[in-house]
Amino acid sequence: MDLELRHLRCLVAIVDTGSFTDAAIDLGVSQAAVSRTLLALERILGVRLLHRTSRSVTPTTAGVQVLARARHLLAEADDLVGEATTGHTRLRIGHAWSAAGRHTAEFQRRWAGRHPDVELHLIRTNSATGGLAEGLCDLAIVRTGVDERRYAHAVVGHERRYCAMAADDPFARRRSLLLADIRDRTVLVDRRTGTTTAEMWPEADRPAVEHTRDVDDWLADIATGRRVGLTPESTVAQYRRDGIVYRPVRDAPPVAVRFVWRRHDPHPATHAAVALLQDLYREHEARRGSKARRARGR
């Protein structure tokens, strides 16, 4: 006989209620069925699980251990059922560092207004797919390359690149930088999720590169003044820290922002999420263009 969840539920019910009679009531079966199920569980495991008297039921030493594992397994099973039955009423969006940057809060507000029946969850996971490959989300916001054999994707916008530096760095006195300004510095890069590579500079003028594994470590290292970092505009909006300043890099190529999802198993709300974030990036670019035209007209 194989171990089944009903065996574990029976054990937990007996211990929690304190009697076979009350366990039978809770489980909706006969007292005889509870006794048979517990006996079957003890046979499967080869150990006695309960001390039984006319007045009490208490776990044996082995029973205490099995009971703890049983509670954990039953909770996992309940979570699995919940995931399967409510998956389309919840949308999990993964990201590695900065979600949708300056658009994150507005994306959440508009989503709640337009799709009140689909609860939105943002999940930060420092992986190249923002948690998609790990099964932690339904779709993810990424700013790196996409494995198109496994994932479908849509570009939702583009972001300028900024140089992050310590507040007392000599570059901090400037309004903007060029890539050539950075070639003599050490650039700190997240090798798994970062958008910066040495190939952005000519081969003869590449800066030294060191690596980090997380945005908090990246910021802490840059704050020391020993290194700088190049990052999309979203980081500027999401990670404003004392001791860190950001300056735009005028000649750095923009970063494409993508939604990615499993090609053969998209969440029903995927395309609604893509359309909403595309709208937010377009609106931002329109405002930026209007502001630039007004500045030139002065």
Image (cartoon, grey):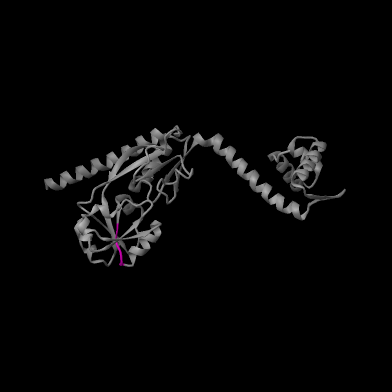
The residue drawn where x is 23% and y is 51% is 252
Total of numbered circles in the picture? 0
Tell which residue pokes out farthest to the front in this image: 204
In the drawing, does residue 122 fall left or right of residue 168?
Answer: right
In the displayed structure, does residue 143 sit left or right of residue 84?
left
Give the magenta part as a residue range: 225-229
Q: Position of residue 112 (x, y in %)?
A: 43, 38
Which residue is pictured at 32% across the width and 43% down the height? 257
Which image quarter: residue 203? bottom left
Give the residue at x 71% y 43%.
8
Against 173, is 43 above or below? above
Identify whether 135 is placed above or below 186.
above
Front residue of 28 and 225: 225
Q: Nearer the viewer, residue 54 or 189?
A: 189
Residue that lies at the very extreme toward the right in this rendered image: 54
Q: Is residue 177 visible?
A: no
Q: Main secondary structure of the magenta part?
A: loop
Q: Quadrant of residue 211?
A: bottom left
- Which percent across, then down, holds residue 151? 40, 38
Position of residue 239 measured from the top left corner of the image (x, y, whole percent):
36, 56
Q: Is residue 228 magenta?
A: yes
Viewer-nearest residue: 83 or 69: 69
Q: Is residue 38 visible?
A: yes
Q: Position of residue 187 (x, y in %)?
A: 29, 60
